[in-house]
Image: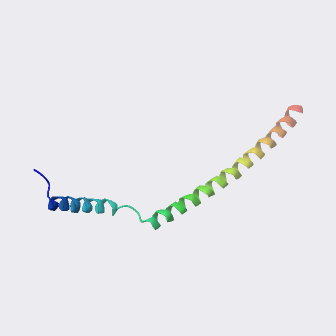
Amino acid sequence: MTLTQKDFEQIEKILEEKLNEKLKSLPTKEEFFSKMDEVIGELKTTREEQTSLSRQVSNHEDRLKVFERISSSS
């Protein structure tokens, strides 16, 4: 049994319907990039906060070492 042109058209129609149904749930290009901008902004903020906190921790460690030296010499 060979497939006819009508069979191919029917298969194409079914595949197109299934594909459209699956693609319907995906975001549009604009929605995707908008969400990615939001995520990247949050990531940038988090990294900046982490850098700031690292500096504060380093400063506190340095100050504690000074206090420890003073305490041990007394």
* The furthest residue to the left: 1
Horizontal side, residue 29 vs residue 24: left or right:
right
Q: Is residue 14 left or right of residue 47?
A: left
Is 29 left or right of 10, judged from the image as shown?
Answer: right
| Label total for image | 0
Q: Residue at x 75, y 44 (%)?
A: 58
Q: Nearer the viewer, residue 59 or 17?
A: 17
| Display coloring | rainbow
Q: Please tell me which residue is depicted at 71% across the width and 52% down the height of the picture.
A: 52
Residue at image position (85%, 35%) is 69
Q: Position of residue 22 (x, y in %)?
A: 31, 59
Quadrant hosting residue 38 = bottom right
Residue closer to the observer: 12 or 22: 12
Where 69 sits versus 60, above or below?
above
Question: Residue 33, percent across and down?
Answer: 50, 63
Query: Compared with residue 64, is residue 49 higher up or lower down, i.e. above or below?
Result: below
The one nearer the camera, 6 or 17, is 6
Q: Most extreme residue toward the right, as rendered?
A: 74
Q: Percent from the top left, x then y, of residue 66?
A: 84, 39
The image quadrant where one finds the C terminus is top right
Residue 20 place in picture, x, y as percent = 30, 63
- For residue 13, which quarter of the picture? bottom left
